[in-house]
Every structure is written in structure tokens, then in C-alpha cells.
Amino acid sequence: MTTDTPVPPGDQPSPADGVAASGGPAATVEPVPMLTPAQEVATVGKNWPKPVNGGAAWARAVPEPPPPPGPNNVAFTGSRWDLAGLMVRGFLLMVPTLGIYRFWQQTARRHFYWQNTVIAGEPLEYTGTAAQLLVGFLLALLLFVPIYIGLFVLSTQPPAIFGIGYGVVLALLWFLGSYATYRGRGFRLSRTLWRGIRFNQKGNAWIYALRSFGWSLLMIVTLGLVFPWMAASLWRYRYRHTWYGDRNFTFEGKGGQLAGPYFLMYAVNIVATGALFGLVGLGGGLAGDGRSLSATIFLLLLLLVPFFLLTFGWFRCVEHTRMLSSVRLGDAALTMRVKFRHLLLQYVLNALSVTGTVLAFGIVILVMVVVVVAANKGVDIADPQAVARLFGNGTISGIALIGIYLTLLATIALLSEIILACGWWILLARGARVSNVESLASVRSTPEDRALVGEGLADALNVGAY
Amino acid sequence: MEFFARYQDGITAEIRDVVCVIDLAALPVALVILDPATRVGIAVWVAGDTYALNARAGELRIGSVSQTPGARLSVQGLDNMRRARSLLPSLRTRQKQDGRRQFGLVGGASAALFLLIFGYIFGVPLLAGQLVHLVPPEWEMRLGETAQAQIESILGEDGYFDDCDSDPSSPGNVAIARFVDAAWEGHNSPFKPDVRVVYSEIPNAYALPGGQAYYFYSLLHESDDPDEFAGVLAHELGHVFHRHGMQTLIATSATGLLVGFVFGDMSGTSVAGAVGSALIDTRFSRDAEQQADQFAGETARRLGYRATALVNLIDRVSGDSAFTQALALLSSHPMNDDRRKLLEAYDIPRSEAKPAFTNAEWRAIKAMCAPPAEDEFN
């Protein structure tokens, strides 16, 4: 029997014979006939025999049914220890690879976030690869070389021209930052699958960057008062150009929804600043001149930074609650509830752990110095010169110093990843509810566009998220 | 043997429970996906085309290279997963293949980067030395003037950074110009060095791109004999001759680019990147200092004064503390002991040496700066 002579479907050997693993006698299939595509299709739609050990076996083994559409049908199943493990592994491998491994670490990180986010029983899937990120980064370099040369030539110009030129370069980078953010979002969406269907982002990154830039100018002119409308406008552009398969997201959010909380935050910060300066001023703290006065002002502003961060964190929760709750996908709708007290907890935890880390590093270094000094009799620990002489071998001390420094940086980055970044993702996942999920079953896929270029620019400009 | 899965075809967002069996009779061997209740076939995958995707713990996700990109079988439960793995050996072989490919990519990219950095560290002093000849001298002179204006606007307040003696025909300036001409003789350079002694309480001297060199009053004040002064002066002339100012500018810009590449942050805002830049740039700078010392040594031997006077002065002003030795990797200058060794090679016996300046010249130079008010330099 050859493939040249089509065989009526009925004549082919029963596929059941080939199910060797089920223990059938025909496990020894010698000359296996080549199936033509038509014949292959014919096996589909045919009734296959149930396994001999009883048909009920499958019913017990089928994985648990999707959770009932309860209040929150989005879950996050990851453990922060797993995330910490892959981050540490990534940092360690970055040393021998001179940082190249960061693209693989980034990809592993995304796998973690995506596959542990389970929407209506089905996890997200991230299909991007590290090589795509690497190629994207190399392409972004091509853009940066001319900018660098431009900066170099600028630095040789008289101060006035240098100042103007530098301003232009900063504005250009700000503009490119929005462009990169949008492109990066598109890259991640187009590599996100849910139920086997791909998300996508259309729209034009240049137009988005122009809009964002225009709004930024308005922000400066209005002293930030226009922010609610800027935010809503950019959210709208992003979501109206977001697709799930052949279905387009819609976005009904309005700037007015953000105006109340934003102006409240704005006013509270102005009042707090005014009150602090007023109090210190009444107490005579603002007397003095020139340098001491500007030092006092700087110190007071520094005191206000945590307060500003807290109020802004609160606003961020409100913004995400209201904006994400305005997202629709056909008949399905997203409802979001991000609670500030959870975010506050993360802020506090992060602040404490970073402080603790810095202290711990300080103590470890101190102990190391004391041990070395104790091992060398005759060195007075109160004499810094003598102590320093002990560490006189330049190369070893230098390498140790850089090692300690990089370890400290990596530890702080790790803490902020597992506390802040992961925390925020969990807040969003657990606060989300997708209503009418069943309506999404009719979404169909669209042809893939497999662009190779990763998020190079976003990476290079340090604007990437997750 | 069979296993249970949730199946999505990658064409619609539907998802359904299925049971999967292997059809050994098919060629190539097929993975047949069936409806669990009716046992009606839903799809046939080529068994050897299947691969495992990265998935959370407790789940095995299977795709196929010959199916639509989103087509998946999601297998859960340990027993179920074990059966799927044993029925589909390609899951393991393709996973190994991918592991090897990723390893090769990481290894190849790291090796390329290693070569780049290696080539850079050893190549850039050479490269910058070559590139600098492409920079038109007039341009470099303009650049020097810009730099001077910037420095003066930062440091020059309350009379600091003014010329000690702005009259070019004063005995002090004439003596310096005579020495510069003598040192410059026989050297082919587009620049005419212009040395100025200026007020500053920092004991230092430096050269700018384009041939301008500055000698700070405070360092002159510390100089005990003419050879010390001449040594530092010749060292700065060495910088001018080698166009180190321009070379440094080129080199640090290139370093910024390279380090940005390693740390992935081209905006230069990461602190780790700054340390990397500092390491490479200071190495480059130490090489430049060494070249300037060589120039100073050769000049000293040619004009017949003692080369090591240079390092005597530096020792006195900024003796290397043990702490700076510990930080030698991050230092922009070579260690004084190393500099002394280098300069000793050029030294001539004390008996044969004659001072770089005559007594009259030296007195005139020392007198260039009016004695400062008591409270100014202490």
C-alpha cells in the first residue's frame, strides 16, 4: 500500500490498533501506512473506543473544574519565594555574563507573573523570548549612538548653547520615553496568550508619544492641574487600541472621574507644605540668610517627600480602580478594586526591609574590619590610617568594595521586586473581576505578526514595567 | 495509556476537556485528541512536534510546532502529567534542545561582550590617540576656551582664578615662557602652550584641551625649589603635547556607551553603571598620567634638571595615604611610589644637575602672586 493510491477511509487499519500503550495486541505495528492529509482528517470525527479499564476513569482524572464565577474570578497563584529564587539566580548569572543574562532574567520574571495570573481558571501565557529582548536592545543602541555623539559635540560648545542643546536632548529623551513605553506595552501584549488567543496593541506609538508630549507641556503650563484629563486621555488611547484576538477593547473612563481625588491630593499636599513651612517660620526656623536658609528649606522639602509618596500612592489606587473599571471587552467587563491599605502595607514593609538591609550590610562590614584588625596584633583600631593600611592591597580591596556594593544594589532591587512590584501585581490581580467571561468564548484569533524586535528602547531608557 | 487535558485550538477562545491517546499506526506517530465522553476525535497532532512550555508548578502545557501558535494542551495532576511525559518523549528532547540553544545564546553573547570590553580597555587609549588627530586644532582650542569659561564660572568667585600676573612681559611670565619654549623645542604640536599662574587655595595644576595650562598659586606656594615647579609644569605640557584633554573626552564618552550597554541603562542613571565607568576611565586616566610623567622626565633630562623633583612636590602635597592605596583601582593618578620609580630612570646625578630656573627667575616666579591675606590660605 503506497500513499499514491488513495484508500477509502474504511479500509485503513483501525487507529485503535495503534494505541499501543493501551495494551492492544497490535502494539507491534510493522509497516505503518503513510496517511494522506485527507485520511488524517478522517480519523478526526471517528468514534474511538473507550479504554478497557472502564470509561469512568477519565472523569476522576479530569482537572478540577474552573472556579465558579464568584465575586473575584482572577487569582494569583505564585509564591514570592519562587520569584525571589529566580531573581537571585538571575543576579548571580549576571556576574559571569557581564549583565547579558538580564534578558533571560526578565523573561523568567514575566513567565512567573503571567503564568500565575489565572483568569476564570485559565492562566495567562507569556510567549516572548530572551533573544527578542536582546535583539531589541541591540537595535535601540543604534538610536543611542547618534544621541551620544550629539551630546559629545554639545559638551564642547559654549555654556549657553550647551544649556539649550541639553534641554533639547532631554525633551527628546522624554518624548522617546513615551514612545518606548507604548512599544513595550505592545510587545508584551502581543506575546500574551489567554485561552490560546493572543492580545495585541494597534495604534501608532509616534502618535501616542506626541499626545503624551503635548499633555506634558500642558502639565507644565497648568502646574499639574490638567493631570486627570491627561491620564484619562492616555488610558483611553491605550485601551481603545488594545485587542484580544479579533475583539477590540473599549474604554469609557473620563478625566472627571479622577479630578476629585487628584485635586484632593493636590490640595492636601499644598496645605501640608504650607503648614510645615508656616510652623517652622513661626518658630523662627526660617530666619537666617543665604546658605543656611536654603539648607533649611531643602530639609523641610525632604521631610515632605514621604508624605507626597503616600498621598500619591493613594491616588494611584483610586486611578487604577476607576480607570480599569472602565475597561470593556465586548460584553465582558472588568471591575477593579485596589485598596490603599494593602499598598500602604507594602510601602512600609519595603521601607523597613531596605533600611534593615543597609544596616545589616553596615554591621557585616564593620564586623569584617574588626575581625581583620583583631587578627593583626599591634594595630590600633582607633587609628584610621593604620586600619586602612591593613587593606592596603589595592586590587583585592577594590574588588571587595565593588562586590559589596553590587550585592547591596542587587539586594535592594530584589526587595523592591518581591515586595513592591509583585505586591502591586497581586493587588491588581486579586482586586479584579471579569464579568460575563463566557461571552469571550466566541473570540477568534487573528494572523500572527511575529515581530522580532523586543522592547529595546524601553529597556535602554529605563521605562520598562514588569 | 492516555492522559487528560484541557484543550484550546488557538483559533477560538473556547476551551474544552479532552482525553489524548497516541496513534502508533499513524506515520508520523500521532497524538489524537478525543472528546472524553463520546470518544470522537477532535484533532490530530504529530506526536514528535509537541513541546513543553514554561508553566506554573503543577501544570504541564504542551504546544506543537506544526499547529497554530496558540494551540495548547494543559495537563494537570501529577499522575496525568507523568503519563503525558512518557507518551510524548519529544517534550523532553525539545526542552533539552531549547536549553542548549539558550545556553549557546547566553554564552555567545557574553563572549562577544567580553571581547568587546577587553578590546576596549586596551584599544581605547590607542584609538583615542588616533582619533584625536582627526579633531581640528582650532576646534579643540575653542573647546578649551569653553571649558575654561565653565571652570571659571564655577570656581572663579571672590577673585579666585584670576591671573596672578596678567602682564605677559613681567619677569615671572617671561621666565615661564622661556622654560615652555625650551621644553617645547623639537616637539611637533599644533598648539602653543599658554601657562598661567592663577589664585586658588587648591594645590593643583592642570591642562585643558587646546594648549592652556594652569598652575594654581597654592601649589606654587608649596614648591620649594625651581625643579619642583618645572617638573609639574613639564608634566602639564606633556598633557598638552599628547592632547590628553581631548583624548579623555573621547574616551569617557565611549566608556559611557559601553557601560550603558553592559548595564542596559543608556540614560546613565544607574549607580552601578557609574562605578563601571569610573573604573575604566580612571584606568585610562592613569595611562595618560604616566605618559605625561614620561614627557616630564624626558624634558628634565634634556634640560638638565632633576626629574624626581616632580614627585617630591606631589608627595608633600598629597602623600598617598594608606586609604587611597586601598582604593588604587578607583584612582585617576598612578601611585606616587610608581611614579617615583618611573621618574628615577630619567634622573641625572645631583652633581651634574643644574636648576631649571636661575635664582633671579625663580624669585620672579615666586613673587608673581601677591602674598595672600592671612586668613585666606590656612
Image (tube, coloured by chain):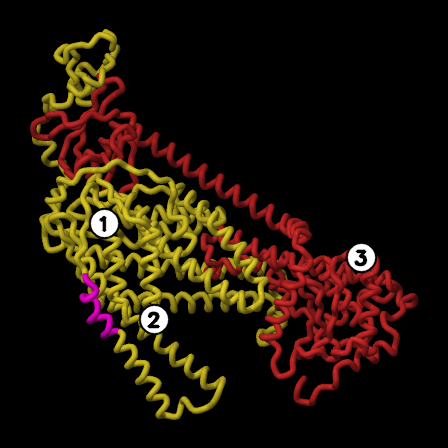
Q: Amino acid at mark 2?
A: Val
Q: Using the image, determine if residue A465 lies above or below residue B325.
A: above
Q: Amino acid at mark 1?
A: Thr
Name the image quarter holding the N terminus of chain B.
top left
Which comes sooner in the sequence, label 2 or label 1? 1
Element under disc 3: loop
- B192 or B79: which is nearer to us? B192
In this figure, which residue is indicated by the disc labeled 3? B187
Q: Residues within 10 Å of mark 2 (few under 14, many from 20)?
A: few
Amino acid at pointer 3:
His
* Residue ID at (59%, 47%): B118
User: How many residues crowd mark 3 within 10 Å: few (<14), some (14–19), many (20+)?
Assistant: few
Instruction: Kindly state the secondary structure of the residue where label 1 is placed.
Output: strand
Q: How far apart are labels 1 and 3 at the CA level?
A: 71 Å
Tell me, yes or no, whether the two marked residues, 1 and 3, touch with CB atoms within 8 Å.
no
The boundaries of the magenta stretch are: A254-265
Chain B hue?
Answer: red
Q: State the residue at coordinates (21%, 35%).
A: B10
Quarter holding residue A432: bottom left
Q: Residue furthest right?
A: B352
Q: Chain of mark 2?
A: A
The reply to whether residue A236 is visible in this rendering is yes
Q: Nearer the viewer, residue B37 or B287?
A: B287
Q: Is residue B72 left or right of residue B162?
A: left
- Report the chain holding disc 3: B
Residue A261 belongs to the span the image colors magenta: yes
Give the mark toward the camera: 1 or 3.
3
Q: Which mark is residue B83?
A: none
Tell me the mark number nearer the camera, choosing from 2 and 1. Answer: 2
Is residue A165 left or right of B352 when viewed as pictured? left
